[in-house]
Image (cartoon, rainbow, N blue to C red):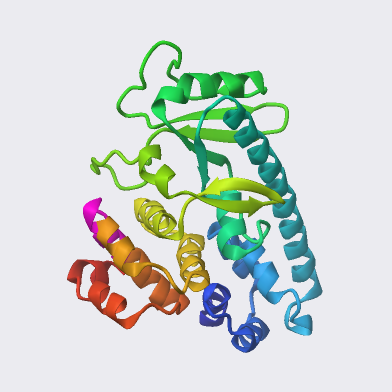
């Protein structure tokens, strides 16, 4: 891939957005097939469409049509996910099961301001382990099938598992029930669960419905944990951190860094923020940025 093509993908995740530079880079692209394939690999096709859809002749009509089709497909999938998530949360609430969704459509609505601009795969719900059997029964009654190869009823989860994976054959909907946030590299021993996030939950709007959501400081730590687990191998994960920081300029940096140190996540946080700053140009308070840059390992990894 040529330099202009790779820079275009970087430009679409930068905050604040630079429409003029994006248009210039789009006009210089020689191989749109490669751009679209790389955007697909990095899960930023929907974001690419939203950033270049109004650039006119800079983007060939065939490319515009392909991006529009991908965007519409993603929008339909996300709206279906949102509808199902609202239904599940209502079902759990009526049964006295506290649950918090994370990533996916909730993240798109909360930090991108549009649940169709970010791809969403399955539905991730964090619950308390003591509600696991009842929550699983409710999913089975709703037409889901358990795909995780271990039993639920009557036995506690085996140590290496931290989620149950459900799929619904009728429409392909996928739900993962988590009782522990295992979002870091193997060997991380902290047991972060609903008791960590529930006291700091907020109310967010999703497709016109009120749902529980994580506060921005916990969300930032969660995004950095997830990106680090996967070695930041997709641009969308860096974009998520950048977008979160851009839409929360008043983030409680003292609180989030203190929480990161308490949970053994300080370097994980430093790496995620450094990547968002270096690649997406997101603004970070100078004292915070210098503190992260001073960690030789985090800086070298970034």
**Front in this rendered view, residue 122 or 115:** 115
Q: Is residue 252 above or below residue 89?
A: below
Q: Is residue 266 above or below residue 186?
A: below
Indicate left or right for 106 with 60 as reference: left
Indicate left or right for 270 with 135 as reference: left
Q: Quadrant of the C terminus?
A: bottom left
Q: Could you tell me what secondary structure mostly forms the magenta stretch?
A: helix
The reply to whether the magenta stretch includes residue 58 is: no
Q: Position of residue 153 (x, y in %)?
A: 45, 12
The residue positioned 31% from the left and 62% from the top of the image is: 255
Is residue 31 at all visible to an observer of this figure? Answer: yes
The residue positioned 25% from the left and 42% from the top of the image is: 190
Q: Which residues are magenta?
A: 261-270
**Residue 19 appears in which quarter of the rendering?**
bottom right
The residue positioned 72% from the left and 43% from the top of the image is: 80
The residue positioned 66% from the left and 51% from the top of the image is: 206
Indicate left or right for 106 with 155 as reference: right
**Residue 260 appears in which quarter of the rendering?**
bottom left
Q: Position of residue 168 (x, y in %)?
A: 65, 28
Is residue 193 at all visible to an observer of this figure? Answer: no
Q: Is residue 135 above or below residue 41?
A: above
Indicate left or right for 188 with 73 as reference: left
**Front in this rendered view, residue 96 or 279:** 96
The reply to whether the magenta stretch includes residue 264 is: yes
Q: Position of residue 290 (x, y in %)?
A: 26, 79
**Residue 195 appears in which quarter of the rendering?**
top left
Q: Position of residue 301 (x, y in %)?
A: 27, 66
How many numbered marks does the figure carry?
0
């Amino acid at each position: 891939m040529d330099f202009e093509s790779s820079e275009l993908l970087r430009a679409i995740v930068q905050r604040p957005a630079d429409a003029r530079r994006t248009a210039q880079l789009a006009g210089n692209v020689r191989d749109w097939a490669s751009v679209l394939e790389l955007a697909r690999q990095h899960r930023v096709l929907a974001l690419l469409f939203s950033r270049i859809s109004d650039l006119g002749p800079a983007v060939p009509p065939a490319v515009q049509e392909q991006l529009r089709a991908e965007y519409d497909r993603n929008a339909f999938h996300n709206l279906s996910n949102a509808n199902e998530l609202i239904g599940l949360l209502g079902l759990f609430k009526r049964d006295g099961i506290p649950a918090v969704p994370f990533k996916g459509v909730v993240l798109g609505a909360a930090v991108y301001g549009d649940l169709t601009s970010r791809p969403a795969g399955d539905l991730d719900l964090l619950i308390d382990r003591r509600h696991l059997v009842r929550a699983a029964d409710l999913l089975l009654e709703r037409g889901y099938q358990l795909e995780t190869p271990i039993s639920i009823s009557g036995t506690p989860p085996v140590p290496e598992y931290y989620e149950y994976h459900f799929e619904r054959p009728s429409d392909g909907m996928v739900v993962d029930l988590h009782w522990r946030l295992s979002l870091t590299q193997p060997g991380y021993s902290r047991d972060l669960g609903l008791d960590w996030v529930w006291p700091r939950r907020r109310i967010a709007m999703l497709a016109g419905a009120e749902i529980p959501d994580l506060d921005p400081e916990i969300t930032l730590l969660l995004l950095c944990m997830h990106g680090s687990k996967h070695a930041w191998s997709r641009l969308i994960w860096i974009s998520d951190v950048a977008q979160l920081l851009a839409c929360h300029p008043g983030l409680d940096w003292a609180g989030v860094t203190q929480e990161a140190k308490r949970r053994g996540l300080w370097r994980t946080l430093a790496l995620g923020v450094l990547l968002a700053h270096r690649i997406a140009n997101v603004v970070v308070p100078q004292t915070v940025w210098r503190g992260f840059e001073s960690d030789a390992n985090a800086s070298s990894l970034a």
